Image (cartoon, rainbow, N blue to C red):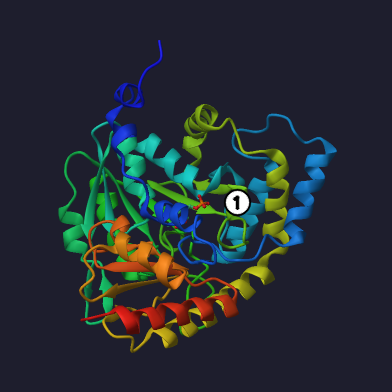
Amino acid sequence: MAMTAEQILAAITPAARDEPDSGIVRAAMYGFTVPGVIPLWAGEGSTPTPEAFARPAAEALLRGETFYTWQRGIPELREALAAYHRRSFGRGFSHENFFVTSGGMQAIQTIVQMVSGAGDEIVIPTPAWPNYAATLRILGQRPVEVPMQFANGRWTLDLDRLFDAVTPRTRAIAINSPSNPVGWTASREELVAIRDFCRRHGLWILADEVYCRFFYGDQGETRAPSFLDICEDEEQLLLANTFSKNWAMTGWRVGWLQAPRALGPAIERIIQVNTSGTPAFLQKGCVAALDHGDEYLAGQVRMARELRDLTVSMLSGLPGVRFEVPKGAFYLFFSIEGMTDPAATVRRLIDEAKVGFAPGDTFGPGGEGSLRMCYLKDRAQLEEALGRFSRWMVTNHRA
Ligand SMILES: Cc1ncc(COP(=O)(O)O)c(C=O)c1O
């Protein structure tokens, strides 16, 4: 018996049916229909993966590495991850603490499925990447959002407010540093305070450090402060990371999860029922990125810093536009005075200025009056996009 669309939708879970679309995805889907738009809505650059990383994957595919593979990831990649972390953090790491996932997204999903159950809570500072709250809601859990403050031109996280949000149902605190979308980067002292609080209360730290290397300190640092600087391997720390951002591999969908050794069998079981493992041939390209990609990554970060500076200089002084110069990641999150409906503004900017941003309210409390743009783009294209936006603002802003 054929059913109406309404009847079919009524038959799925409310969590799956009622979850709002990501505003980033909605902007992109709308923007794809309008010719000539410069897309700055998504968190990725405009160049494809370097051939040096792509070729080993293509060759492995053609060689016939097309079978089911290790649930934790191929040993070669887990060893390369341990070596990359030894280089980046100057201390020992074991391959036993690394698990290959389908993107950073699946690392987060695995963590949430493992530490938190129906009705449980995870505390998340906002504005935050919307997939956190959505993942929790779809799993029947509760995101507890704690807005950061924007005052005196700076985003800050009030740690007392963060800790006050913890209840007996809280299982974890999620910290994304450097953050998407605002670029807030936790200091070592803040990380220590969060670690100590979580230790005292038996909470998990869900550390999302996917932008760890995109850090623009003024002391020549090559990465942001990390929970890996201050935590043991074998404690309640779970890190989500990805190949997507460092090595221009967003479309590959490969990431990793770093976890205590004791969780190996549990993580394997979760991977088994979600994806049954990440394609082995893709993992060969990831080994090449880790083994030969340090220079490429350093170049990407240098370029990102220059593009950030270009963006800041082009948008400074625009009427009604306010932002903090981000210390990390590759986004500019800016408020526009008087803007009440960011999604409508995003659509107008796509139609009228042919430039594509993401609406700030999709990032949760604190993002209402803002837009987000990714500046990791071809320089000439970025300049053109910012020029279009500036002209549109001068014509349309009536603050
Ligand atoms: C904060 C944050 N965490 C995780 C991810 C997931 O990365 P991936 O594309 O590898 O799933 C993203 C991607 O935009 C992100 O911004």
Residue drawn at (65%, 33%) of the image: 70
Residue carrying label 1? 251
Type of amino acid at the residue the image marks with label 1: Gly
Q: Nearer the viewer, residue 209 or 12?
A: 12
Residue drawn at (36%, 66%) of the image: 348
Q: Residues within 10 Å of mark 1 (few under 14, many from 20)?
A: few
Q: Position of residue 218 (x, y in %)?
A: 46, 84
In this picture, is 339 found above or below 102? Answer: below
- Ligand 1 neighbours mark 1 (CB distance < 8 Å): no
Provide the secondary structure element on which disc 1 rests. helix
Q: Is 156 placed left or right of 263 in the picture?
A: left
Instruction: Residue 243: tell me if it is visible.
Output: no
Q: Nearer the viewer, residue 36 or 341?
A: 36
Q: Nearer the viewer, residue 38 or 163?
A: 38
Placement of the N terminus among the 4 image quadrants? top left
In this picture, is 395 found above or below 231? Answer: below
Q: Position of residue 234 (x, y in %)?
A: 44, 46
Q: Position of residue 12 (x, y in %)?
A: 33, 24
Farthest-out residue, top: 1
Q: Is 67 placed left or right of 362 in the picture?
A: right
Instruction: Residue 387: tell me if it is visible.
Output: yes
